[in-house]
Image (cartoon, grey):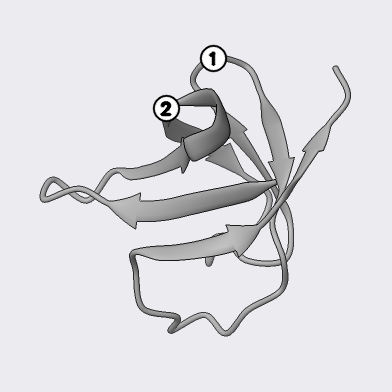
Amino acid sequence: MKVMIRRSAQGQLSAYVPKKDLEEPIVAMDNPEIWGGKVTLANGWQLELPALAADTKLPITVEARRLSE
């Protein structure tokens, strides 16, 4: 699914899923640089993000995979 990752002015990362009209803060991540691992959203969803360079500019839309609960 397409997911937009962005950083707020306060530095909080969030994920926006256009098909679900859902925007949630990212509350946990496997990798400190976010890319190439699992992230957890505030609503409990877990997404697997693609491996990208640590200095990838935000906002960016990526193809993510929702992991089963």
Q: How crowded is mark 2: few (under 14 residues within 10 Å), some or many (20 or more)?
A: some
Foreground pick, 25 / 3: 3
How packed mark 1 is, by other alpha carbons closer than 10 Å (few <14, some 14-19, many 20 or more), is few
Q: Residue furthest front?
A: 19
Q: Where is residue 66 in the image (x, y as percent from the top left)?
A: 77, 36
Residue 53 sits above or below residue 44 on the image: below
What residue is shown at x 22% (from left), y 51% (from top)?
A: 11
Task: Say if 18 sits above or below 62 in the image.
Answer: above
Q: What residue type is labelled 1?
A: Asn
Q: Of the two numbered discs 1 and 2 on the same chain, state the one appearing first in sequence.
A: 2
Q: Exactly how many numbered labels are in the figure?
A: 2
Assign a secondary structure to mark 2: strand
Residue 24's tag is 2
The residue drawn where x is 43% and y is 84% is: 55
Query: What's the residue at 62%, 66% (across, down)?
Result: 35
Asked which secondary structure carries label 1, the reply is loop
Quadrant in which the C terminus appears: top right
Q: Position of residue 3 (x, y in %)?
A: 55, 49
Q: Which residue lies furthest to the right in this view?
A: 68
Specify the label residue 43 is tagged with.
1
In depth, the one of 68 and 16 nearer the eye is: 16
